[in-house]
Image (tube, coloured by chain):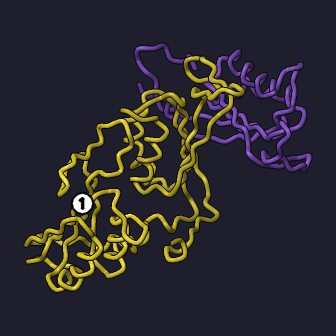
Amino acid sequence: MLSPGKALKVSIYLSEGSTHHGVSTSSSILDFLYFRGCSGATVLKGVAGFGADHHIHSANFVEISDNLPLKIEFIETRKKVDELLGKLEEMVGSGLIEVQETTIAKPAQISKPKKAPAPEHVKIEGKAQLMRIYIGETDRWRDQPLHEALLRAMRANDLAGATVYRGILGYGAHRRVHKERALNLSHDCSIMISVIDTQEKLQEFLPLVDAMVQEGLVVLSDVDIIKYSHRPAAAAE
Amino acid sequence: MKEQFQARMLRIHFTEADKWQGEALYKAIVAKCMELGLGGATVFRGVEGFGASARIYHARSLSISKNAPVMVTVIDREEQIQKLLPHLDQMIQGGLVASSKVEAIRYSRSDQPSSKA
């Protein structure tokens, strides 16, 4: 785990086509860094470049060029870099390794502990509300299908769960019949999204529905939740 | 435009194979709803299920089965729904109608005529 302060940034330049013991050098270097406990590494792909042999490698040519430049970067403490450098020099073959001093302003955090606090909605029992939203499959919100946008919004707002249903036949306020047709991918069916959560949660979410749904029907009804459970986080992984 | 009102929701369950006067029952029900001027109706096809006849249907079988469970949802004001009920009595031979009171919010574009419901 890195801490703020002085560190070294190592950049390794190589060609995409180069191999080390039969596998691509970049992936074997990445594996090496990973298993040696390096705190992070990134492989970047160049679009054009030239190296020691003075051949320009570029992605512009129609033929599939497998000699594009690659760059692997990682940041580590001086001690760790010294430890890794010998092996890296051997692996990189004709490539170039550069080490520069850098300062870590903020180290990356391991994201797992953040996940640990269970979502708030875990325990809902008894009285709740069921919200059904009826819209058309072709309805859009900004640049995406409205039902997908609504689902994402619901997820982002921690609603307990939502399901999108596609109707096979239906009509709404405009009397236009939406119909599923055999053997062609019809994209103009009716869509129903159903969400169940507490009344407060759904009331909080309604303004978003207001803003996103131009046309459609929203129906709320009271329901009793009999069971709502999920696997514990550890088991789910 | 936003309009909020108390409504009733019907969920009518039967199968895709059910017929009314030679036509698929679900189509007939949707047509009837339109004829009566109800606000809307949507038909959903189930993936798996069983009903009064206790026969399990599922979509896995390769045969082009027409016996999938089907549900029609109709939502409108109480008095509109009451208009539909006698027709359902006639049309549905074997099936289930569930009815519940709901709170509805209807969104419609103000530049287009909305339903009269």
Q: Is residue A60 above or below residue A81?
A: above
**SS of the residue at dot 1?**
strand
Q: How many marks?
A: 1
Q: Position of residue A131 (x, y in %)?
A: 54, 45
User: In the current view of this chain or complex, which residue is farthest to the front?
Assistant: A53
Residue plotted at (86% across, 50% down): B56
Q: Is residue B55 left or right of residue B25?
A: right
Location of residue B40 with respect to A146 vertically, above or below: above
Relative placement, left or right, of A75 versus A22 is left
Chain at numbered mark 1: A
| Residue at (58, 50) in percent of width and height | A222
Color of chain A here?
yellow
Q: Left or right? Give the position of A35 relative to A188.
A: left
Q: Position of residue A102 (x, y in %)?
A: 9, 71
Q: Residues within 10 Å of mark 1 (few under 14, many from 20)?
A: many
- The percent coordinates of residue A173 (x first, y second) are 55, 21
What residue is shown at x 74% (from left), y 19% (from top)?
B32
Q: Amino acid at mark 1?
A: Lys
| A191 shown above or below A81 | above
Q: Residue at x 25, y 51 (%)?
A: A46
Note whether B114 is above or below A63 in the view shown: above
| The C terminus of chain B sits in image quarter | top right
Colour chosen for chain B: purple
Q: Quadrant of the N terminus of chain B?
A: top left
Closest to the observer, B109 or A70 = A70
Q: Which residue is mark 1?
A: A71
The quarter holding residue A175 reads top right
A108 sits left or right of A190 in the view: left
Residue B22 position in % (x across, y down): 89, 19
Closer-to-camera residue (A115/A192): A115
Which quarter of the figure has residue A63?
top left
